[in-house]
Image (cartoon, grey):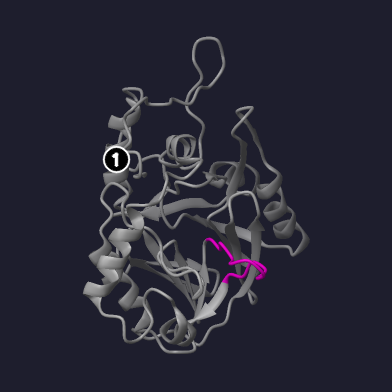
Amino acid sequence: MTLSSARPDIQAFFDPQTWTVSYVVADPATRTAAVIDPVLDYDFKSGHTATTSADRILAHLREHGLSLQWILETHAHADHLSGAHYIRQHAGGRIAIGQHIRTVQRTFKALFNLERSFLPDGSQFDHLLADGDTLPIGGLTLTALHVPGHTPADMAYQIGDAVFVGDTLFMPDVGTARADFPGGDARQLWRSIQRLLALPPATRLFVCHDYPPAGREPRWQTTVAEQRAHNIHVRDGIDEDAFVAMRQARDATLEAPTLILPSLQVNVRAGQLPPPDDNGVAYLRIPLNALPVHAAA
């Protein structure tokens, strides 16, 4: 796979509550932009949502005179609620995600026993992407890369000399994403990561989360060369079987993400809240004794 020499303008927005990094990616020539993985703030104790994180992105778009063309989700996140719907309401653009979101929707429609009107067909999103599909961002071209393993629907997005890898890779001293969610697979994750690490060494990689070790500030930009030399899970010299054994053993010890149950009910709807009941209040559902103790979405 080759990369364009185009160099988009990239602004990162780090949410310390969920360790999530959202991005505004802009074509400097046309001032056209895409937003990747925006966050809707959610207070677990009170059940209140807020838009502080998304409003930072909207302010950046206004301040820099950017026209929003796309709102891109790398997958249906289990650790934060998506701000995609809110961003679209206030800045326009179209929401896109990988076409395998339909598999994820079927899984969680069943788990949450969602309303009959919820169709697991991806229609909640404006555009579904297959591997190799392209989208324009002004004069830039985005190429969608299907990188399953963390979930069956994960996508990475190549824009110029940058690739937004979602949860597939973390910073080198943190490693890689878990692969024990429904439809996840450690061997698939290995192969998806190898696809990314086959890119030119100088390729910039932007991660969706950072969980920094003690003493390090959050970071979110790395390169293929850095990952191949230093990633604690997949650096050069670690083979597929060793990675799979490590990943499966590690995943068996992990608790479910704190926001998995509220986030997935929203994220399979492209960031929309569930429809309100007849009293005008929207509710999130908590399935009791349905998730394995150490597994998640």
Residue underneath mark 1: 121
* Residue projecting furthest to the right: 63
Image quarter of residue 215: bottom right
Residue 112 lies in the magenta-colored region: no
Front one among 33 and 230 = 230
What's drawn in magenta, residue-wise?
A: 209-220
Residue at horizontal 45%, vertical 49%? 77
Q: Position of residue 130 (x, y in %)?
A: 30, 61
Front one among 59 and 212 = 212
Q: Amino acid at mark 1?
A: Asp
Q: Position of residue 13 (x, y in %)?
A: 66, 60
Front one among 194 and 274 = 194
Q: Position of residue 46 (x, y in %)?
A: 64, 27
Q: Is residue 151 above or below residue 201?
A: above
Q: Position of residue 158 (x, y in %)?
A: 44, 73
Residue 217 lies in the magenta-colored region: yes
Residue at horizontal 63%, vertical 49%? 17
Q: Is residue 221 above or below residue 23?
A: below
Q: Is residue 105 above or below residue 133?
A: above
